[in-house]
Amino acid sequence: MAHASDGHVLEFKLPDLGEGLTEAEIVRWLVEVGDVVAVDQPVVEVETAKAMVEVPCPYGGVVTARFGEEGSELPVGAPLVSVAVGEGTAAAAGPARDSETDAGAAGTPATETPAAARATETPAAQTKAEGSGNVLVGYGTSEAPARRRRVRPGQQAATGASGRANGRVLGAGAVDGPVPTAEPVDGPVPVISPLVRRLARQHDLDLRELTGSGPDGLILRADVEYAVRAAAAQGGRTADPEAGTSRVVPDAPSAALSSASAASSASRSEGTRVPLKGVRGAVADKLSRSRREIPDATCWVDADATELMRARTAMNASGGPKISLVALLARICTAALARFPELNSTVDTEAREIVRLDRVHLGFAAQTDRGLVVPVVRDAHTRDAEALTAEFARLTEAARAGRLTPGELTGGTFTLNNYGVFGVDGSTPIINHPEAAMLGVGRIVPKPWVHEGELAVRQVVQLSLTFDHRVCDGGTAGGFLRYVADCVEQPAVLLRTL
């Protein structure tokens, strides 16, 4: 790394993205090696499973190295950029830029010198530079500078030309996937989350025989999944010459590399494979978790929405901003949650407690080119129909443009899903974990209906409520749904309860 007198080099690592996010894909670099950056200047645009985010660097100085190419994925905690800070760092711009190509090929910071290395290893020197602590809006990080990653003996550094810390050894005789350790590790094996341990147990994998591809050998979910795929490609069994039988070898990725490659190539030739990553992968993970952990039930009812549609038409005819139908449904939802607070809650499984929430942060499903996202309207219970209409419009536009921040996609307490826009009448929604309920609204269509004792053509909608049976029983869920239906059929009911 470039180093100047009275200056030192700090390494900025990919920060904690919050909400269980463990990795991000580099979409576009905003700086080059040798550029001078200011404190909190965005240096890279990354795509998480939640949104597209510009990551600002908490240090000001000269960029001496970038880790990772555009299109590659980095785990949280992996080096992102290194910055020379302090007096005289501007002089480092030239040499650093000249050796950028070599740094990318070798997977090491550009023009690293012994003096620079010593500077990064000196805690006293590191504490001289003060970062802003602002990394991702809504989350932030500690202000303490990150330490350089130490590679354990026998472990390959995982920040090469691809920049992806996934256990790959680049160059001649490259090996793709986690590399088994030569000796078992004593003590607990470091994993990125308890889910990784559970996944390993489900497939009878010994984590001690894997080398993690995360920082400092941290075992990621991708490492375990690779070992599972490798064992499956090998048939999961290998001959035991001593016993004359077969024994299960579920975690031998090195021995199964050729088999896995052949199986992968054969399967690819039979159809199109779409990686479950980014937004699509996040949706898959969250819906799967909801199905695994939440004992849900669904109830539904048909409602006559004729009067609600008339009320909306009258409101919009009076002048002023137009009121959307989803805003009126949101007002009905918040009023219903005030009467049935059990459905605005979450379950703390560790404490075995139901946590009833005081504020309604209303999520709504929005379909975009990048997949399904659920933006959240904060404090929806405090907004009127006009304010809700404006916020729905703003968040929908940001979702379609890919500009939603992580804070705008997290923290919901109840979700409203208007799947009627897709031309369908009904559905059984999957709860947006860790919430306790979701209201689904089908299309509003003319149907025969008995109105005031006579058969008439009315505007009918199907409403469905999926709820967590741990937080309430059918009586509460039915009462909530019936109240919503009454407000749809007679909007005056809502006025009486405000």
Image: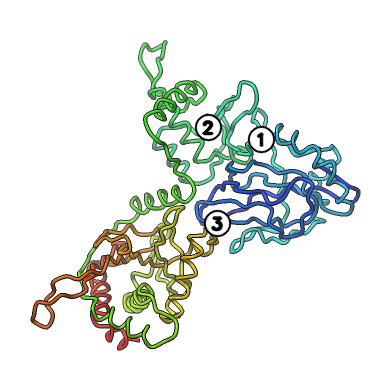
Q: Residues within 10 Å of mark 2 (few under 14, many from 20)?
A: some
Residue 498 location in percent, x, y? 35, 86
Q: Amino acid at mark 2?
A: Arg
Q: Is residue 361 above or below residue 12?
A: below
Which sits earlier in the primary sequence, circle 3 or circle 1?
Answer: 3
Q: Amino acid at mark 1?
A: Ala
Q: Which mark is residue 267?
A: none
The answer to whether marks 3 and 2 mark residues whose Cβ atoms lie closer than 8 Å is no
Q: Residue at x 27, y 73 (%)?
A: 480
Q: Is residue 173 above or below residue 369?
A: above
Q: Residue at x 56, y 51 (%)?
A: 47
The residue labelled by disc 2 is 208
Label 1 SS: loop
Viewer-side label of 3, 2: 3
In the shown orientation, is residue 408 left or right of residue 435?
A: right
Q: Residue at x 67, y 46 (%)?
A: 80
Label 2 SS: helix
Q: Which mark is residue 161?
A: 1
Q: Residues within 10 Å of mark 3 (few under 14, many from 20)?
A: some
Which sits earlier in the primary sequence, circle 2 or circle 1?
Answer: 1
The foreground one among 28 and 173 is 28
The residue labelled by disc 3 is 18
The answer to whether marks 2 and 1 mark residues whose Cβ atoms lie closer than 8 Å is no
Label 3 SS: loop
Q: Residues within 10 Å of mark 1 (few under 14, many from 20)?
A: some
As measured in the structure, the alpha-carbon distance from the residue carrying label 2 to the one carrying label 1 is 28 Å
Q: Quadrant of the N terminus?
A: top right
As measured in the structure, the alpha-carbon distance from the residue carrying label 3 to the one carrying label 1 is 27 Å
In the shown orientation, is residue 190 left or right of residue 30?
A: left
Q: Amino acid at mark 3?
A: Gly
